[in-house]
Image (cartoon, rainbow, N blue to C red):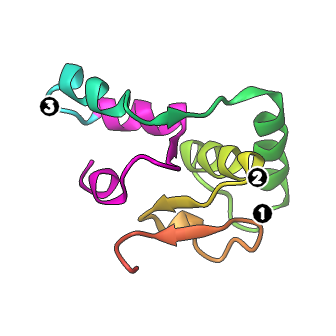
Amino acid sequence: MRTLAKMGTAALYISPVTIAEILEGSEDPVATERALSEYHSTNIGWQSARRCALNQSRATQRMGENDAWQAAIAVNAGHSLVGHDRAFERREWLDYIDHRKS
């Protein structure tokens, strides 16, 4: 949530997978949901399912399922993926920004 606050809302999109992960760890899900509702959300859909399957089937090292979905959703939407997770590093097909390193 701190990273989202620093980045503003103009062109930020949050995947349903990310929303679920944030809500799962939230101490106050109602307040968190209210804060997240200020951002645009993306859909999963068939295209992302296809991309997720393609990425996983071709990977020499598979991603965790949530990470694979997040990456596929970002790629299909033409967005950069912002996070802090080694699973996203060195994926040539993914525009990844580690918010703790930038």
* Residue drawn at (28%, 32%) of the image: 35
Q: Secondary structure at mark 1?
A: loop
Describe the element under mark 2 as helix, strand or loop: helix
Residue 27, labelled with which disc? Answer: 3
Q: Which residue carries the number 2 mark? A: 56
Up the image or down, 41 lies above or below 52; here it is above
Question: Magenta residues, as a range?
Answer: 1-24
Which residue has dot 1 on it?
59
Q: CA distance from mark 3 to mark 2?
A: 32 Å
Residue shown at 22% from the left, 24% from the top: 29
Q: Is 2 or 56 nearer to us in this picture?
A: 2
- Say left or right for 15 vs 55: left
Label 2 is placed on what type of residue? Gln
Kindly report the distance in space between the C-alpha atoms of the residues bearing marks 1 and 3.
Answer: 35 Å
The amino acid pointed to by label 1 is Ala
Q: Is residue 5 magenta?
A: yes
Q: Residue at x 72, y 46 (%)?
A: 77
Q: Residue at x 51, y 35 (%)?
A: 40
Q: Are marks 2 and 1 in contact (CB under 8 Å)?
A: yes
